[in-house]
Image (cartoon, rainbow, N blue to C red):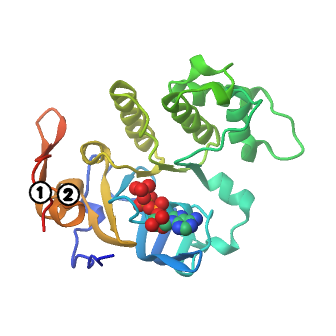
């Protein structure tokens, strides 16, 4: 595997994007993260920051370590080195219960248990707010319905989870995350099975949520989508974060060639349309 060196002097995140101006204090800070799985080091040096009101897109080729980075940041995977801090506290000192109140995690591949319907699944997402001793009340039922509505999944409320299409399941997974009511939303490729219209609806929802003050971390392959909605892009390659900054600066043609080995250029027009012009049939860049 070729090692891609980190870029020196990538632009400061504080100058980025469509989000609100001066950044609030970060809720999540990951520094110099290393992760080993099955005796192999998968992430060697990764950084990530989640701040209220900002949307960070984590991009990079297949196998770059994006999922491993966000899973470890979310406290779902143990770090072998470096730092993961939630509200300034080492993640190892944060109880699972408190973590569940701080962050919602929408996984790339959700487990789909048999015999559970969408309403029940989203109520399970709500459980960190309910606690072990209390039964769901009116506020919880309203929160479930609101999460389903915001995720454009309300019409699926009585369906069995196991009968949903890939795109329907992704919308429900988002609702599960939203029902949790956490200030940080981490979503791993939540749009991979969505059609064009559903993706646009989702993009608008994410921007609205960021506008409402949520900190969002989104793993995404669609670079045109990332460019349209992210305040900041984090590029991962070979287990390292190799660039961080505003999409227009970070996703330049030279980097697309170097990291993705493709001749491609991002384009943004005055009305906020973004496109990736790709020379699909050109041989990979050397
Ligand atoms: N549980 C595991 N056991 C062994 N190898 C793993 C495990 N999880 C991840 N890996 C390996 O670690 C590397 C990084 O995986 P990861 O899923 O983090 O990458 P990614 O950037 O999210 O990829 P993709 O874009 O394909 O989803 C890959 O080579 C993957 O095969």
The circle on residue 208 is: none
Whether residue 106 sits left or right of residue 98 in the image: it is left
Near-viewer residue (165 or 219):
165
Residue 110 spot, x, y in % from top left: 60, 44
> Is residue 278 visible in this depiction of the protein?
yes
Residue 202 spot, x, y in % from top left: 41, 33
Q: Is residue 163 above or below residue 229?
A: above
Residue 269 spot, x, y in % from top left: 11, 37
Residue labelled with disc 1:
283
Cβ of mark 1 under 8 A from ligand 1? no
Q: Residue furthest bottom?
A: 81
Residue labelled with disc 2:
251
> Mark 1 falls on what kind of element?
loop
Which residue lies at the image location 9% right of the left edge and 52% below the top edge?
Answer: 282
> Mark 2 falls on what kind of element?
loop
Near-viewer residue (96 or 210):
96
Which residue lies at the image location 55% right of the left edge and 61% below the top edge?
Answer: 71
> Is residue 87 visible in this depiction of the protein?
no
Q: Nearer the viewer, mark 2 or mark 1?
A: 1
Sequence-wise, which precedes: disc 2 or disc 1? 2
Residue 108 spot, x, y in % from top left: 52, 48
């Amino acid at each position: 595997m070729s090692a891609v060196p980190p870029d020196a002097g990538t632009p400061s995140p504080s100058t980025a994007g469509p989000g609100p101006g001066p950044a609030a204090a970060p809720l999540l800070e990951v520094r110099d993260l290393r992760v080993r799985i099955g005796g192999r080091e998968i992430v060697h040096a990764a950084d990530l920051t989640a701040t209220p009101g900002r949307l960070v897109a984590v991009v990079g080729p297949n196998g770059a370590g994006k999922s491993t980075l966000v899973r470890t940041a979310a406290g779902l995977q143990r770090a072998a080195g470096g730092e993961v801090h939630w509200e300034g506290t080492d993640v190892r000192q944060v109880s699972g219960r408190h973590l569940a109140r701080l962050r919602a995690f929408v996984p790339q591949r959700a487990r789909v248990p048999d015999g559970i319907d969408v309403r029940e699944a989203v109520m399970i997402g709500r459980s960190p707010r309910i606690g072990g001793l209390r039964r769901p009340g009116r506020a919880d039922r309203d929160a479930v319905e609101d999460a389903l509505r915001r995720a454009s999944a309300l019409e699926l409320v009585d369906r069995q989870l196991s009968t949903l299409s890939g795109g329907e399941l992704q919308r429900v997974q988002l609702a599960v995350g939203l029902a949790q009511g956490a200030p940080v939303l981490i979503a791993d490729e939540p749009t991979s099975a969505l059609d064009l219209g559903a993706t646009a609806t989702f993009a608008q929802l994410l921007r609205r949520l960021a506008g409402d003050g949520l900190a969002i971390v989104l793993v995404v392959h669609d670079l045109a989508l990332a460019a349209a909605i992210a305040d900041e892009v984090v590029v991962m390659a070979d287990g390292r974060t190799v660039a961080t900054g505003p999409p227009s600066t970070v996703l330049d043609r030279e980097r697309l060639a170097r990291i993705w080995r493709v001749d491609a250029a991002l384009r943004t027009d005055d009305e906020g349309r973004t496109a990736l012009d790709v020379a699909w049939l050109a041989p990979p860049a050397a």
